[in-house]
Amino acid sequence: MQTKLNEVRNKLQAYGQEHLLAFWPSLSDDSREKLLQQIDSIDFDLLQQLSGKAGKKEKPDSIEPISAEKWTEFDKSRQAELEQLGWSLLKQGKAAVLVVAGGQGTRLGHPGPKGTFDIGLPSRKSLFQLQAERLINLSGKAQKNIPWYIMTSPENDAETRSFFAEHHYFGYDENSIYFFEQGVFPAIDDKGKVLLARKDEIVMAPSGNGDCFPALKRNGILDQMKQEGVEWLFYYNVDNAIVRIADPAFIGYAAASGLQSASKVVRKSHARERVGILCMQNGRPAVAEYSDIPEELMLAADDKGQWLFPYANISMHLFHVNFVEKAAAYPMPFHAANKKIRTVDAKGDKVVPEQPNGYKFEKFIFDCFPLMERMALLEVEREDEFAPVKNKEGQDSPDTAREMLYHLHRKWLLAAGVSRELIEHQPVEISPLLSYAGEGLDSEVIRSILASRVV
Ligand code: UTP
């Protein structure tokens, strides 16, 4: 171990990170081994480059508007044609699903994996269960199990797997569910020093949802997908309570576009909404963070009063597997986020900071968009598809997501002929096993929903 230690010490000195061995004399052999391995896995050159940029704002690229097509503006026969194409791909096993479920959910403050969170519906179903049941519904109709790839983090992988096992995979085919882990990256303090979580352990944070394609590749899943004939991968965030997983209409739309990727978007709710905006940057599709868009562009409108940048990113994308392969080999940029990071002080005692004390680094999935010349954008209604669970309370919280789900399910019942008085001002939850997007609500089903309020 001595030779290895000398080697590591020299390396750390070269990068100004020798403090990582500060507790060496007091560590057990196992702890020493673990720490050396962790240090060995770090790309200090990259870390040095990133810490030079952390906290500095980069000049935004040139931003131009991008166009989208609106689902409700397609005529009925076009809609039916696209849906049919999507169903045919699902039936042939050519479409699969990828959920990114590896984050830390710090704003929500839920101790377990975000997908295990129960937003307080009458059924007490977790986000994972709602998603599994939508897949059961679709798979039944397609008569083909849809592969479901679940990206976890090293921190939440075991808990996610046991949650699924304890709940018997929510009735979905266990062999169609594949868990795989994303990567991690060290966190640093304001001076660029790598932070220790304990005397013998470096703070390693999940490296962002943008790691999903390299992680698919590293874990052999990409090759498996290709062997099994999967052509399209539906990507979504685990924290959307009403996500239309593997929506056949969207799959058909992407496949008919002749392009390698499509993204669902919604209209910004107000001009300054704090969301990522779909646009063209340097002539390529991209998502600009709201903080990167100059105020005048946020508000810019054409002569009919229509915003020039109306499309909000809702993290629902379809990627052709050939593109996934290409993106997996592309070194996506890291973004630094100033965060409160638990660490230890000079004596090795735990420190729980009250203010941000350092940086974590994350890759974002949308940074692969500029690898394409064009992307197909499908505008959908927010109230039908997007109820994010990000914060403990207030905006984008379990309360708002639950209300949106009730609102959506009431809307389905109204469309099925139920009178407003019967369902107003009370929770209405329709099981995804009965209806994926409002279909199949015949009088018998409606009777049972109204009788129990939860089906
Ligand atoms: P968010 O950016 O909302 O991050 O993730 P988060 O970790 O869930 O929550 P905060 O920011 O700490 O409060 C958007 C999606 O990307 C996934 C999340 O699970 C969520 O589905 N994600 C995020 C990962 O899979 N890995 C990551 O490293 C980060």
Image (spheres, helix red, strand yellow):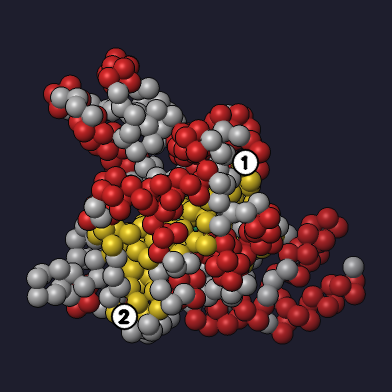
Which is more toward the observer, 21 or 433? 433
Q: Residue 95: x, y in percent? A: 53, 51
Residue receiving disc 2: 63
Residue 162 versus residue 17 in the image, above or below:
above
Residue 114 seen in render: no
- Residue located 49% across and 76% down the image: 371
How far apart marks 2 and 1 lie (CA) works out to 41 Å
- Residue located 49% across and 53% down the image: 234
Q: Please state if 428 lies on the left or on the right of 218 as rendered.
A: left
Which is more toward the observer, 177 or 25? 177
Q: Please state if 255 lies on the left or on the right of 146 as rendered.
A: left
Identify residue type, mark 1.
Ser
Which of the two labelled residues, at mark 2 and mark 1, occupies the earlier sequence position?
2
The kind of secondary structure element at disc 2 is strand
Residue at mark 2: C-beta within 8 A of ligand 1: no
Residue receiving disc 1: 176
- Residue located 22% across and 56% down the image: 73
Q: Please state if 297 lies on the left or on the right of 152 as rendered.
A: left
Q: Residue 161: x, y in percent? A: 63, 40
Identify residue type, mark 2.
Ile
Quarter assignment of residue 206: bottom right
The disc label shown at residue 27, or none: none
Marks 2 and 1: CB-CB under 8 Å? Answer: no
